[in-house]
Amino acid sequence: MRHLRMGPGWVAGVAWLAVMGGVALGCGSQGAPVRTGDDEQAQVPVGTEDRERIERGLILSPVPLNLTGLDRDLVGLGSYLVNATSGCSDCHTNPPYLPGGDPFLGEPEQTNSANFLAGGRPFGPGIVSPNLTPGAEGLPAGLTYEAFVALMRTGRTPGGRILQVMPWPVFSKMRDADLRAIYEYLRAIPPAQPGTTPPPTPGPGPGPYP
């Protein structure tokens, strides 16, 4: 089965991630707990223009973050990029919203945190969004940082396949610092398993805007 990374087109933006897609939606759980440890890395300097994004990103994350050994600023910025600008959850969380929490149905937004960024969303024959959460070795989607960056910059898997659905041509233009931040955020989220796609909910069909 072919796995994509981050699809945006029809869902408004997509995230590898921000990724993997090699990597939300305005995630609705504010104030997710953050765990830190004594071995947390020294914070890297960030510009004042990023400070508000960092703090906002830490609030927006719909899942608890484990900052042990990670840089809080990079994780916060990565969360902002994944959850407020890239729409990663639209393709990599299946389903993106909880029952009764779909904003596209006029409901108060509630992100599906149990399956957050765990992939499993089908996009056609042989195309399924990958799980971006950390595996047993703590690597998002099993990718080292170097492999992640190569994937985002070239849109090609290690085997040479070109990513589909995932908007890698957009992500390939991001700053190195932004791609690093996205990767660090994916390292900080909890591992999760893919959810299942519920049957479509009947609703009004597409039509011209009023």
Image (tube, rainbow, N blue to C red):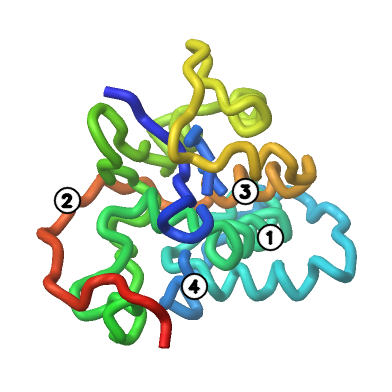
Q: Kindly identify which residue carries mark 2.
A: 196
User: Label 2 sits on what residue type?
Assistant: Thr
Kindly give the residue lying farthest to the top in the view shown.
Answer: 159
Residue 117 as seen in the image, left or right of residue 45: left
Residue 170 quadrant: top right
Of badges 1 and 2, the one in the foreground is: 2
| Cα separation between marks 4 and 1 | 14 Å
Which residue matches tag 4?
26
Q: Residue at x 67, y 30 (%)?
A: 153
Q: Is disc 2 surrounded by few (<14), some (14 to 19) or many (20+) residues within 10 Å?
A: some
Give 74 or 130, whichever is nearer the viewer. Answer: 130
- Give the x, y percent position of residue 63: 42, 64
Residue 21 image label: none
Q: Quadrant of the N terminus?
A: top left
Q: CA distance from mark 4 to mark 3?
A: 16 Å
In three-dimensional space, the C-alpha distance between marks 4 and 2, rounded to whole angstroms, equals 21 Å
Q: Earlier in the sequence, mark 4 or mark 2?
A: 4
Mark found first going from the N terminus, 1 or 2? 1
Among the two numbered marks 4 and 1 on one chain, the one whose residue lies closer to the N terminus = 4
Mark 4 neighbour density, 10 Å: few (under 14) some (14–19) many (20 or more): many
Which of discs 4 and 1 lies nearer the camera? The answer is: 4
- Label 3 environment density (alpha carbons within 10 Å; few <14, some 14–19, many ≥20): many
State the residue at coordinates (58%, 28%).
155
Provide the residue designation for mark 1: 77
| Image location of residue 81, percent across then percent down | 63, 59
Identify the amino acid type marked 3.
Answer: Ile
